[in-house]
Image (cartoon, rainbow, N blue to C red):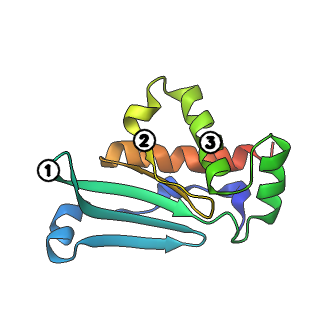
Amino acid sequence: MNYKDLHLEAIMIPDNIEGLLEQDSMWDIEVPPFSISVVVTEFKGHDTLTWSIEFSPAFDFEDLNERLEAKGFESDGHGWTAYIQECLSKRFKNYADMIKEDSDSETCCLYTFNKSNFTTLLSLVSEAIRELYN
């Protein structure tokens, strides 16, 4: 994949996602190495949509991992999460209210609870990855 031109925000998420989730509890799309999904989860006692992106930096990220390490981050799921969170903090003072994480050493996993924040997240993940080439 050519990560220099990455634009995950261009992924078409159906407008009728809530209707689709009534039939199936999950909507997802794979854009290797990224897995993008919307699921119905319980949050603070209420059913809510959870919008997530996750990826394994071990998959096809050799060059990007080297670039990430050159910026002082580990090239694992936690390091990628920290890097993306740093990029988010440059744009949004209270990004932690918008974007949550559930990463581990193998996987970077970021999620939110509304489509608008998710679209922003997809854009910022793409931007953060493209920025590694500058």
Q: Which residue is drawn at 57% across and 48% down?
A: 125
Q: Would residue 106 be visible to someone looking at this image?
A: yes
| For residue 72, above or below residue 4 | above
Q: Which residue lies furthest to the bottom in this view?
A: 23
What distance separates the C-alpha of mark 3 from that of mark 2? 12 Å
Lower sequence index among marks 3 and 2: 3
Picture layout, residue 74 above or below residue 89: below
Point 81% across, 42% down: residue:
134
Q: Is residue 14 visible?
A: no
Q: Which label number is shown at residue 82?
A: 3
Asked if labels 1 and 2 touch by Cβ distance under 8 angstroms, the answer is: no
Question: For the residue marked with disc 3, what is the amino acid?
Answer: Ala
Residue 99 marker: 2
Which three-letter amino acid code belongs to the residue tagged 1? His
The residue closer to the viewer here, 102 or 86, is 102
Q: Residue 24 carries which label?
A: none
- Per the model, the C-alpha gap separating discs 3 and 1 is 29 Å
Q: Sort mark 3 into few (<14), some (14-19) or many (20+) by Cα contacts within 10 Å.
A: some
Left or right, 77 with respect to 131, comes to: left
Query: Label 1, on which residue?
Result: 46
